[in-house]
Structure formats: C-alpha cells, structure tokens
Amino acid sequence: MSSAADQARWNRKYGDPAFRSGHAPNPRLAAAARALPPGRALELACGLGDNAALVAAAGHRVVGVDVSEVGLARARAAHPELLLIQADALRLPLAPGGWDFVICTYYLERALFPWLRAAVRPGGALFFETFTEAEHRRRPDFPVGFCLGTGELRAAFADWELLAWAEEADPALAYASLFARRPRK
Ligand SMILES: C[S@@+](CC[C@H](N)C(=O)[O-])C[C@H]1O[C@@H](n2cnc3c(N)ncnc32)[C@H](O)[C@@H]1O
C-alpha cells in the first residue's frame, strides 16, 4: 500500500473518536524504556502517542513521527508534552544516526529496516514489535503483508545484542517483539 493510501486509511480510522490502538501502551516497551538510561528516543508510526508517552515517562526525550495528521491531532491533545512530527516514515526529514533508542510497533515496512539499523547510534537500542504470520492464520482476513515470517525479525538484527525477544502466538495475538542493542563497533 502506498504511503498516501495508508495516510487516508489511518485518517479515517483515527477520525472515529472511539477508535483505540489495541497495542499501546505496550508493557514490553515500558520495560525496555525503563531498562535504558534516559536519552534521545524516536518512535516511528507513533499513532495516538500512548507508547511515546510511556517512553517519555521513563525519562527519555521522545520525538514521535506518524503519517496521519488526524492521529497526531489526537496524540497532541492527549499528550501535549510530546514532540510529534507528521511525516512519511519512508521519506523522513531526519538524518539516521544519533538516536539512543528507536521504537517501531505494529507498522511493518521492510524497506525501513536498513534505515532503522542506521538510525540507532552504536551502543543504542531498538524496540520493534509487530504481528507474525500466525496472526494471519488466526484471522485469515488480516493481510499477510502486514505480518513477519517466523524468525524474520530476529534474523534482520542477528548481529545485534538481544536484550529481550519474544515470538508468541497466543489466542489473542501473534507477534514478534525485539529489544536489541546495536553493536558498539
Ligand atoms: C497499527 S498502527 C500502530 C500505531 C502504534 N505504533 C501502536 O503500536 O499502537 C499503524 C500506524 O502506522 C502509521 N503509518 C502508516 N503508514 C505510515 C508511513 N508511511 N509513515 C509513517 N507512519 C505510517 C499509521 O498512521 C498508524 O498510526
């Protein structure tokens, strides 16, 4: 799906005041944020800002980015302390590198993996979590294109130090969750 189509789709969803993310605030991200010393954090596809807010509550200075201006308006109203930028994650107006902590949850764009690897400073950390194909098997109407293959996320960051890793398929949700440190050299 193109970024413009994604933007329109998410603007429609966030335009319904009853719509909430089923995946934020994320308890695994909260634990990861608390495990790191306070630093500069970047969240891609931050949606309604609930994850960015919990990272900020752990002491990090957070910048959130999302393509949906409707979602960001709600995020700004709920979390006025956050710095939020409307941008397409695939055409970010930010240089990669220098971030102590980069976060991306429930937004899968494989073309971003090289950018994510470069965005985290050496010794910094990434938290990435999203659906696996087991979610598509559980809910066949859920597009397989939004799902990671088994072991795919771990393999994409195989040379990073694992701080936490889970690949779970429980009755409610099938996801892979990676918290990893970029090598210092
Ligand atoms: C399933 S929601 C996840 C939101 C949040 N990360 C969470 O875990 O609840 C996907 C998010 O990706 C955003 N998104 C989709 N395409 C994007 C793009 N090209 N650039 C930035 N954000 C995008 C949507 O606006 C939406 O907020």
Image: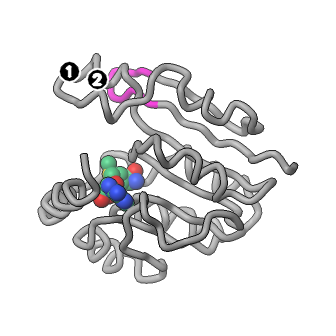
What label sits on residue 136 in the rendered view? 2
Left or right: residue 141 versus residue 153 is: left
Q: Is residue 151 magenta?
A: no
Residue 60 percent across, percent down from the top left: 64, 70
Q: Amino acid at mark 1?
A: Pro
Reply above or below: 174 against 20: above
Asked if the residues shown at circle 2 and circle 1 are in contact, with their CB atoms under 8 angstroms apart, the answer is yes
Question: Dot 2: within a 10 Å radius of its alpha carbon, few (fewer than 14), some, or many (20 or more) residues?
Answer: some
What label sits on residue 140 in the rendered view? 1
Callout 1: helix, strand or loop? Answer: loop
Rendered image quadrant of residue 25: bottom left
The quarter of the picture showing ligand 1: bottom left
- Closer to us: 118 or 173: 118
- Closer to us: 39 or 149: 149
Residue drawn at point x = 36 percent, y = 29 percent: 173
Reply above or below: 154 against 63: above
Residue drawn at point x = 33 percent, y = 25 percent: 135
Q: Amino acid at mark 2?
A: His
Callout 2: helix, strand or loop? Answer: helix
Model colouring: one colour
- Closer to us: 151 or 173: 151
Residue drawn at point x = 81 percent, y = 45 percent: 183
- Closer to us: 92 or 162: 92
Residue drawn at point x = 73 percent, y = 57 percent: 36
Give the residues in magenta: 169-175
Residue 7 percent across, percent down from the top left: 23, 61
